[in-house]
């Protein structure tokens, strides 16, 4: 049986008196690509923010490898290997592509050889970033900025990469490319939890998935099971 990397048990998260997540149970095993599907406002980002330490949980447990991680600060979680590529990208627009990538490697500050290797790997995955390495991040197109955001996350050498809506706002052709690259990153050995509204494309590359509605997981299954589930098709795939 594959090794469990992330295990979330009975997680509850509140914003003031509003309970945004209720009794969330999820797990991700070593090497998997797991997708979290849900409409706007269902609670996907809140789960991600809880895993990466940005949201406090009011109940339940998040375990990563063999450790309870709720309550650990976001920067320590990055050092443990939980790296989130944020929705909205959050790049440094005035800084160059190369400099943005180096910022992602701050956890490996002392190891210059590692950082150089990671930078080259990102340039192999996204050749356009190599072409534009001296350009300001703010001058890139939306798709290129998303690639840079993913590249920057990879610089931290994630053991678990959290991708929150990487296809948001991108042109269809770029979306296709983006999913191919996400699949490649997973096949190269990075465990991925992906939140998406683009259910059809996400299920094509994922091993398993969870569906969240109003802060609760309502269905889980293999990608095939979810893809062939009529309710899910109606709600999220539309065919
Ligand atoms: P989206 O794709 O729109 O980001 P989502 O599935 O990621 O949707 P969340 O952002 O996790 O959804 O939001 C879940 C619920 O929590 C929503 O009802 C949202 O209005 C609420 N919410 C999110 N952030 C806050 C906050 N800072 N304060 C209060 N309520 C919040």
Image (cartoon, helix red, strand yellow):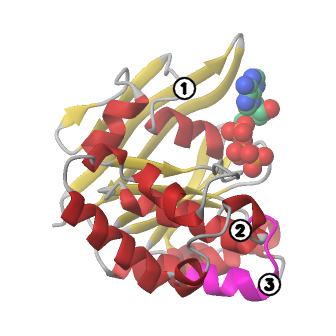
The Cα atoms of the two marked residues, 2 and 3, are separated by: 22 Å
Residue placed most toward the observer, 114 or 156: 114
Is label 1's Cβ within 8 Å of ligand 1? no
Which quadrant of the rendered structure holds the C terminus? bottom right
Q: Residue 169 colored magenta? A: yes
Q: Which mark is residue 55?
A: 1
Extreme residue toward the top, this view: 17
The Cα atoms of the two marked residues, 2 and 1, are separated by: 28 Å
Residue 228 visible at all:
no
Determine the main secondary structure of the stretch shown in magenta: helix
Q: What residue span does the magenta drawing correspond to?
A: 167-179
Res 19 → quadrant: top right
Which quadrant of the rendered structure holds the N terminus? bottom left
Which callout, 2 or 3, points at the residue further toward the start of the chain? 3
Q: Which residue is mark 2?
A: 232
The residue positioned 51% from the left and 57% from the top of the image is: 99
- From the image, state whether disc 2 or disc 1 is nearer to you: 1
Q: Which mark is residue 172?
A: 3
Res 214 → quadrant: top right
Residue 161 on image: x %, y %:
42, 57
Residue 113 on image: x %, y %:
20, 65
Q: Secondary structure at mark 3?
A: helix
């Amino acid at each position: 049986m594959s090794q469990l990397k992330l295990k979330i048990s009975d997680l509850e998260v509140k914003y003031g008196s509003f309970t945004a997540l209720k009794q969330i149970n999820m797990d991700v095993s070593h090497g998997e690509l797991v997708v979290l599907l849900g409409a706007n406002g269902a609670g996907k980002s809140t789960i991600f923010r809880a895993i990466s330490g940005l949201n406090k949980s009011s109940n339940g447990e998040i375990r990563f490898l063999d450790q309870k991680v709720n309550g650990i600060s976001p920067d320590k979680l990055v050092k443990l290997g939980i790296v989130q590529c944020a929705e909205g990208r959050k790049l440094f627009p005035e800084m160059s592509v190369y400099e943005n990538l180096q910022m992602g490697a701050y956890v490996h500050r002392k190891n210059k050889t590692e950082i150089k290797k990671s930078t080259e790997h990102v340039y192999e995955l996204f050749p356009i970033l190599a072409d534009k390495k001296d350009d300001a991040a703010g001058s890139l197109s939306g798709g290129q900025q998303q690639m840079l955001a993913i590249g920057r996350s990879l610089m931290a050498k994630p053991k678990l990469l959290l991708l929150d809506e990487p296809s948001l706002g991108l042109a269809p052709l770029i979306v296709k490319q983006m999913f191919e690259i996400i699949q490649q990153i997973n096949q190269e050995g990075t465990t991925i939890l992906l939140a998406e509204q683009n259910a059809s494309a996400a299920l094509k590359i994922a091993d398993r998935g969870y569906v969240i509605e109003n802060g609760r997981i309502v269905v889980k299954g293999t990608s095939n099971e979810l893809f062939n589930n009529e309710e899910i098709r109606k709600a999220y795939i539309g065919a």
